[in-house]
């Protein structure tokens, strides 16, 4: 009878969390849920500071606060200044009706965005991208497609004027999205020839072919929990070339849940990292200060996003995956003080 030696279970490689660092390129820090307010109703105490503390412990060294309208961009800049972060200035496609509804007209709205950028180009809390702008054909009830297209195009001029990268949103609109970019001179090298500096298509949920087309045009791709929901999403995430990838959470949105395709890849997350990236959360009703809130995503979870991408690219060490995204982010947005 053959005898076999029972091999010892391979030791789980120890992971020193301090080796992995992240920049969350998409955080909606102006969202009132981080102050305990949900749809105008207070459910718990303001815990922004505790949430930021958890993020720091999870290796999140900096963040880019998303500005989704003129008003929100002002708030984003203010928060970024207070907290030593960065911000974007622009108008989200679902809010692009604000241009036409602006009391002194759409030109004036654009001018206000322009002035806001001009006044915050340097120093602490500065603007590092024009956006969030783009197209969202899943939500044309907020702004008709024609309105979205017009004001996406007008914001592209700001990126050229200030040589700033774009922070882009594209949902169910790929064809029109790339057509406008191409017509405006962003067809290759991220629009270098027209004075632009590329950008990132954040919260990417398109196909591999669409991702490849965007990378070929010189755009980065931002991956978060929403980009890892289905097996098709995972195939797309795997198709992103290392030099074009960035990580984000889009907090408080895009939490990774147990029913999504990312879940099996998260089961291998070592406990030393899991306790930092996904600390036990409580429901808003049973809030405990210092604990995450169920259903409210936060930047600490960015390591989980990077872990899934590392698992999809079997063999590439986690540290290398995290560092590549870090380097891409620092370079595109000119975050030289983080080097
Ligand atoms: Zn978005």
Image (tube, helix red, strand yellow):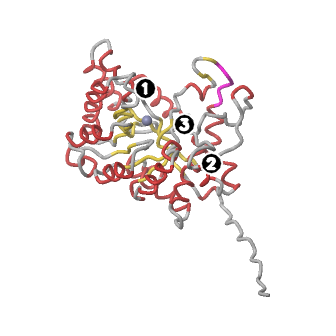
Q: Mark 1 points at which residue?
A: 74
How dense is the environment of label 3, judged by Cα within 10 Å: few (below 14), some, or many (20 and up)?
many
Secondary structure category for the residue under label 2: loop
**Which x, y percent locates residue 332?**
37, 49
| Occupied quadrant, residue 241 | bottom left
Disc with the residue nearer the chain's start (3 vs 1): 1
Residue at the top extreme, as displayed: 103
Q: Name the residue under label 3.
A: 251
Viewer-nearest of labels 1 and 2? 2
Magenta residues span: 42-47
The residue under the point 67% across, 36% down is 292
Front residue of this view, candidates 51 and 77: 51
Q: Mark 2 points at which residue?
A: 58
Secondary structure category for the residue under label 1: helix
Q: Is residue 152 left or right of residue 320?
A: left
How dense is the environment of label 1, judged by Cα within 10 Å: few (below 14), some, or many (20 and up)?
many
The residue under the point 42% across, 42% down is 202
How dense is the environment of label 2, judged by Cα within 10 Å: few (below 14), some, or many (20 and up)?
many
CA distance separating discs 3 and 1: 19 Å
Front residue of this view, candidates 108 and 257: 257
Judged by its main secondary structure, the magenta piece is loop
* Magenta stretch encompasses residue 44: yes
**Which x, y percent locates residue 213?**
30, 51
Does the residue tagged 1 have its C-beta within 8 Å of any atom of ligand 1? no
Identify the image quadrant of the N terminus: bottom right
In the image, which disc is placed on residue 156?
Answer: none
């Amino acid at each position: 009878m053959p005898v076999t030696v029972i091999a010892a279970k391979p030791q789980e490689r120890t992971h020193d969390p301090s080796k992995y660092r992240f920049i969350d390129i998409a955080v909606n820090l102006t969202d009132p849920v981080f102050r305990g307010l949900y749809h105008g109703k207070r459910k718990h105490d303001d815990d922004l500071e505790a949430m930021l503390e958890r993020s720091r412990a999870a290796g999140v060294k900096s963040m880019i606060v998303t500005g989704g309208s003129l008003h929100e961009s002002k708030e984003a800049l203010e928060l970024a200044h207070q907290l030593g972060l960065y911000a974007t200035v622009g108008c989200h496609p679902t809010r692009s009706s604000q241009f036409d509804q602006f009391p002194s007209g759409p030109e004036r709205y654009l001018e206000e965005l322009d002035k806001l950028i001009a006044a915050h180009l340097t120093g602490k809390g500065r603007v590092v991208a024009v956006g969030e702008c783009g197209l969202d054909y899943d939500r044309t009830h907020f702004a008709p497609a024609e309105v979205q297209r017009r004001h996406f195009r007008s914001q592209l001029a700001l990126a050229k004027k200030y040589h700033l990268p774009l922070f882009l949103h594209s949902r169910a609109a790929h064809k029109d999205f790339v057509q406008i970019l191409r017509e405006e001179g962003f067809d290759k090298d991220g629009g270098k020839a027209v004075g632009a500096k590329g950008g990132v298509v954040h919260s990417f949920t398109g196909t591999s072919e669409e991702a490849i087309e965007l990378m070929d045009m010189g755009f980065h791709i931002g991956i978060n929990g929403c980009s890892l929901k289905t097996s098709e999403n995972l195939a797309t995430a795997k198709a992103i070339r290392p030099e074009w990838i960035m990580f984000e959470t889009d907090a408080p949105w895009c939490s990774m849940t147990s029913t999504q395709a990312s879940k099996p890849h998260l089961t291998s997350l070592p406990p030393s990292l899991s306790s930092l990236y996904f600390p036990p959360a409580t429901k808003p009703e049973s809030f405990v200060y210092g604990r995450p809130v169920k259903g409210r995503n936060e930047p600490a979870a960015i390591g989980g996003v990077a872990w899934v991408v590392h698992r999809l690219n079997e063999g590439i060490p986690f540290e290398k995956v995290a560092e590549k995204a870090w380097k891409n982010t620092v370079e595109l947005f000119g975050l030289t003080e983080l080097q």
